[in-house]
Amino acid sequence: MTRALSARQRTLATWWAEGTGTESREGVIAEGAIRSGKTWAMVLGFLLWSQRRFSCQRFIVAGVTVEALKRNVVGPMGEALRQLGWAWSFNRSESRISIGTNTYHLFGANTERSQDALQGLTAAGCYADEVALFPKSFVDQMVARCSVGGSKLWFNCNPSYPSHFFKTEFVDRADELNLLHLHFEMSDNPTLSQEVIDRYERMYTGVFYDRYILGLWTLAEGLVYPDYADALEDERPDADAVEEWAVSLDYGTQNAFAALMWARAGATWHVVGEYRYSGRDEGRQKTDADYVEDMRAFAAGLPRGTRFFADPSAASFIAAMRRAGFKVYKARNDVMDGIRETGACMARGDVRVWSGCEGLVRELSGYRWDSRGGDDRPVKVEDHSCDALRYGVASLRINEGRKARGYSMWGATHGQGVHRHV
Ligand SMILES: Nc1ncnc2c1ncn2[C@@H]1O[C@H](COP(=O)(O)OP(=O)(O)O)[C@@H](O)[C@H]1O
Ligand SMILES: [Mg+2]
């Protein structure tokens, strides 16, 4: 299980040591491809540095959420400590780890208010995992808290869009800020076989491929699902072959209301039907009661208890559906995660779309990234069926189902489980 570090990992783990020529840097940024060994080498370096240089000090260890930290960082940390032979204790309820006389405080950094938890702390260093997913306020506050002499900053992330604050204010200004900048590629992880690398490459499409596989800070441009046509099918599965049904929907009164019918046959989820109504196009808005009746007709013939996944903002409609006896859940609604998972599922053939879903197919052919804003967002026109599609993928957890079914490519070397935020 233990492997020697690659050359770049060794640099990341030891840059702070006497005689390396980089010891006077105030910190390090490791950015690039997923699974390239950034976290593993950084955890090791951070532990060695903090234990050699300090006693009775506090350190910030931050991740998108404390849960993500426990999964992605505390696991490798335990393994590194085991290999180093150092004793440690983890106070779960207070989210802190004690090693020797030092204390490592775990923080989640997913909202603008997360930085409040850092107020008043004086730290000798910080470790930020997946820092490009943090709000800027948290990063600024974290840097400000590291005021002990000799403190250093440790940042790692996968690329995002090119105008992202961490790219423009940290990565691009690394020299000026006296930070060591290390760019990682998958080949920098000595434990990945070519087979595993090939599998990762198949998991990402479009802009996610450029960022997570190639490690580039690229702008999302052009079609959101450039290869959607490969996921179309002219025949639907036989009803006998269907093991599970579901409906996902995007609610609209003026805008279109779009629902998709899903059918699982074996490991593949097929989109086999659609419902669309546009109050604007038809010149008449429908009420929640009208839509409930339309859903009853749309889902006629589906088994009782079939799950509906609805636009989570459609509170009144969800309530009306529930009163009418439907089993309705709020859809998982993270746009980027949903698009990434949907692209991957279509590319792998885990999601197929019947070409008779004309509204969805038309939308897919025109669903584009809005590159004018410089960040990640699809153009918000004619996206209703596309939203319903991603609600279905995200809520049915089709992308995760594949892992659960044992096609895992997460190769959890240290048993730390699924790496949700890549
Ligand atoms: N030198 C190494 N020895 C043993 N395992 C490693 C080594 N480098 C990376 N790994 C393992 O490879 C996987 C991916 O590495 P990780 O550091 O999590 O990548 P990243 O943070 O770049 O996504 C993890 O399971 C990690 O523990
Ligand atoms: Mg990582």
Image (tube, grey):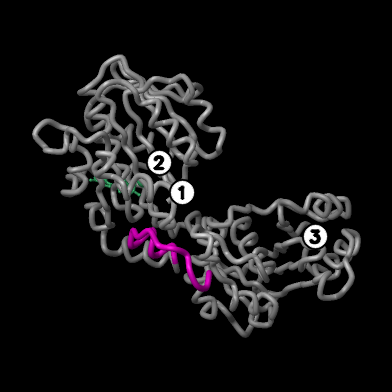
Counting residues from the start of the chain, the first of labels 2 and 1 encountered is 2
Q: Is residue 67 visible?
A: no
Question: Which quarter of the picture shows residue 147?
Answer: top left
Where is residue 135 drawn, in percent x and y? 49, 41
Foreground mark, 2 or 3, reads 2
| Extent of the magenta region | 207-224
Q: Is residue 206 above or below residue 185?
A: below
Give the crowd class for mark 1: few <14, some 14-19, many >=20 residues within 10 Å: some
Q: Nearer the viewer, residue 75 or 41?
A: 41
Residue extending furthest toward the front? 176
Residue beneath the point at 62% across and 58% down? 396
Mark 3: C-beta under 8 Å from nearest atom of ligand 1: no
Q: Is residue 236 left or right of residue 60?
A: right
Counting residues from the start of the chain, the first of labels 3 and 1 encountered is 3
Give the crowd class for mark 2: few <14, some 14-19, many >=20 residues within 10 Å: many
Label 2 sits on residue = 72
- The answer to if 330 sits in the magenta stretch is no
Q: Which mark is residue 304?
A: 3
- Whether pointer 2 and pointer 3 mark residues with C-beta atoms closer than 8 Å, the reply is no
Q: Nearer the viewer, residue 317 or 349?
A: 317
Q: Tag 3's secondary structure?
A: loop
Question: Which quarter of the picture shows residue 258?
Answer: bottom right
Q: Nearer the viewer, residue 162 or 274?
A: 162
Q: Is residue 243 left or right of residue 74?
A: right
Mark 2 vs mark 3, CA separation in Å: 40 Å
In the picture, the quarter occupied by the N terminus is: top left
Q: Which mark is residue 421?
A: 1
- Whether pointer 2 and pointer 1 mark residues with C-beta atoms closer than 8 Å, the reply is yes
Foreground mark, 3 or 1, reads 1
